[in-house]
Image (cartoon, helix red, strand yellow):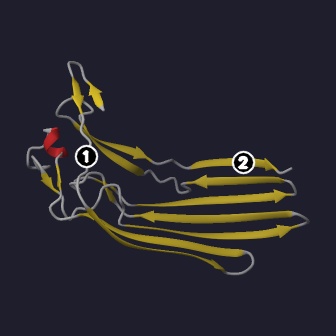
Amino acid sequence: GSIPTTFFVLSTVTGNVGSVTVKGAEVEGIWEVNDNITFDFGASYNDATYDDGVISQRFGLAGTCDGTVCPTGEVPIGGNQVERTPAFDAYAGLGYRGEFGEDNSFYLRVDGSYQTKQYVDEANLAWVPDRFLMNLQAGVTLGNINVRAVVQNLLDERYVSNSLFLIGTGGLGSTSYVPIFGLDRTARITVGYEF
């Protein structure tokens, strides 16, 4: 691709950085406490790092590093955590289901998720902080009609869900970190009819 600038077109090169080793484990489960209450959970650990000897050319190509804040030239990144990959994340949810009358039911569910920080660039200079989010769901079915309410980010946390490290977006010799914010508290209601 290319990025148009005022006087010329800046070409970009895409290539493989090098090899990565990923070690990890994942567990998830559901516990039916009784006919009405369900507890589900999951967790994963990911040790995703660049192998020894891997280098990044992006910082050198940017031409914006002075060797103090960020290194100049080809940057050795062996042993660094792979960008945009949290080392640990987990979730847990608690749900309750019940019935009333004929063909009527309801449910209520609350869940939470946690994610450790994730680096934005391969040199591990910048990162997105860890976060904890909660959601709430409730629904009722009355014969053929069902109503569902969902509240995402129940605690209204202000958080960055991801971020990009870009080179050349502002012209030759420019770099930028572009944070992508997650949703503020968001509520929605859906109504459905089954026929």
76, above or below 33, in the image: above
Amino acid found under the numbered disc labelled 2: Thr
Splitting the image into 4 quarters, where does residue 139 fall? bottom right
Can you give x and y, in whole percent of width and height, for residue 157 in the image? 47, 54
Secondary structure state at the residue bearing disc 2: strand
Q: Is residue 153 left or right of residue 120?
A: right
Q: Residues within 10 Å of mark 2 (few under 14, many from 20)?
A: few
Q: Which residue is depicted at the point 25% across and 30% down?
A: 170
Splitting the image into 4 quarters, where does residue 1 fall? top left
Can you give x and y, in whole percent of width and height, for residue 185 in the image? 55, 50
Q: Is residue 44 left or right of residue 101?
A: left
Q: Nearer the viewer, residue 114 or 62?
A: 62
Q: Is residue 140 left or right of residue 143?
A: left
Which residue is disc 1 drawn over? 15
Q: Looking at the image, how many numbered discs can be counted on the residues? A: 2
6, above or below 10, in the image: above
Can you give x and y, in whole percent of width and height, for residue 119 in the image? 30, 56
Secondary structure state at the residue bearing disc 1: loop
Q: Which residue is depicted at the point 18% across and 30% down?
A: 172
Q: Residues within 10 Å of mark 1 (few under 14, many from 20)?
A: few
| Farthest residue, direction right | 102
Q: Which residue is depicted at the point 70% across and 59% down?
A: 138
Q: Nearer the viewer, residue 136 or 173?
A: 173
| Farthest residue, direction bottom | 33
Which dot, 2 or 1, sits closer to the camera? 1
Can you give x and y, in whole percent of width and height, for residue 13 in the image? 24, 39
Q: Is residue 173 left or right of residue 169?
A: left
- Earlier-in-chain disc, 2 versus 1: 1
Amino acid found under the numbered disc labelled 1: Gly
Residue 190, disc: 2
